[in-house]
Image (cartoon, grey):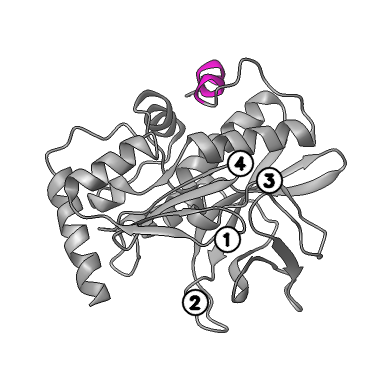
């Protein structure tokens, strides 16, 4: 049975010692995770299946100096929190960003529930450009401030599911809905398999990346690189060619790119499709 290499994981987060088992310690871990382990979909760009067992996840995050998406980032963070002694469990969510009103999407997002300091907290380090940057109180329906956006958790009538929304210039955007039943490991395997392989998934063949620091977000999507800072207009610029994309991924996201002969052609194909979609 694979065990997590806690010292190396903490080193990856640039921490010399485990933080205390408090809300402040949990917040520090989430913020370091968001700022140092990027959300990125290079494996999906190459149309590869994405393994999410612990051995594969820590090899990718720690050995390969890569990032990942929710099943990898939140899966790794869950293993770390549990190894450190936090009361943490997984939850699964139905993503709502592109859903029609009333549409019931599949459970394809992994997030975490952590009990600390007498409260339940939602922790998420893997939702791309809208990833919350601090723990959110699960049972507080009022808008919750973060160093970036405000977020809101509300209960749906009837089944009592939670809906997480983020505040934008256009109002509140529903991100995903979830309940408090922890998924079995096989449920995550099925959801992950859909995300990385199903023809109706938006991930295969696409490049997305996001990294979030104390007062900035960096994203790649739709052929553009964008930086966001609170109170400022987004700084967006097009990515011109494969070399441009590689440089941004390495310099702005800290990624060690895989030595794969398919990578440059896949990046070029993604750029061409992104440009065609905007014409």
In-image side of 202 versus 171 (left or right): left
Sort mark 3 into few (<14), some (14-19) or many (20+) by Cα contacts within 10 Å: many
The dominant secondary structure in magenta is helix
What is the C-alpha distance between the residues marked 3 and 1?
A: 18 Å
Quarter of image, res 163: bottom right
Sort mark 1 into few (<14), some (14-19) or many (20+) by Cα contacts within 10 Å: many
Q: What is the residue that sits farthest to the bottom in this orientation?
A: 101
Tell me the SS state at disc 2.
loop
Q: Position of residue 40 (x, y in %)?
A: 38, 46
Residue 214 is marked as: 4
The numbered mark, 4 or 2, whose residue comes first in the sequence reads 2
In-image side of 30 versus 54 (left or right): right
Sort mark 4 into few (<14), some (14-19) or many (20+) by Cα contacts within 10 Å: few
Is 130 magenta? The answer is no
The numbered mark, 3 or 4, whose residue comes first in the sequence reads 3
Along the line of sight, the residue nearer the viewer: 138 or 276: 276
The numbered mark, 2 or 1, whose residue comes first in the sequence reads 1
Q: What is the residue that sits farthest to the front in this orientation?
A: 232
Marks 3 & 4, CB-CB < 8 Å contact = no
Q: Position of residue 147 (x, y in %)?
A: 67, 49
Specify the segment rendered in magenta. 6-12
Residue pointed to by mark 3: 134
Along the line of sight, the residue nearer the viewer: 71 or 278: 278
């Amino acid at each position: 049975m694979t065990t997590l290499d806690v010292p190396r994981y903490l080193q990856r987060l640039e921490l010399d010692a485990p933080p205390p088992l408090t809300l402040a310690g949990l917040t520090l871990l989430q913020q370091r995770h968001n700022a140092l382990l990027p959300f990125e979909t290079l494996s999906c760009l190459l149309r590869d299946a994405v393994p999410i067992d612990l051995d594969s996840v820590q090899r990718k995050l720690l050995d390969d100096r890569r990032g990942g998406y929710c099943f990898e980032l939140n899966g790794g963070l869950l293993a770390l929190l549990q190894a450190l002694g936090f009361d943490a469990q997984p939850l699964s969510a139905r993503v709502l960003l592109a859903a029609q009103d009333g549409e019931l999407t599949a459970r394809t997002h992994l997030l975490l529930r952590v009990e600390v300091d007498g409260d339940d907290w939602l922790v998420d380090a893997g939702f791309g450009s809208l990833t919350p940057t601090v723990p959110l109180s699960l049972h507080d329906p009022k808008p919750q401030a973060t160093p970036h956006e405000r977020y809101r958790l509300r209960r749906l009538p009837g089944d009592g599911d939670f809906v997480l929304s983020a505040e934008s210039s256009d109002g509140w955007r529903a991100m995903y809905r979830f309940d408090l039943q922890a998924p079995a490991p096989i449920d995550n395997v099925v959801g992950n398999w859909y995300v990385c392989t199903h023809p109706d998934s938006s991930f295969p063949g696409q490049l997305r990346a996001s990294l979030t620091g104390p007062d900035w977000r960096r994203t790649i999507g739709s052929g553009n690189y964008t930086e966001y800072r609170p109170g400022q207009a987004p700084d967006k610029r097009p990515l011109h060619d494969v070399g441009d994309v590689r440089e941004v991924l390495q310099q702005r996201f800290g990624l060690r790119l895989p030595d794969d002969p398919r990578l440059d052609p896949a990046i070029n194909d993604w750029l061409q499709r992104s440009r065609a979609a905007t014409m």
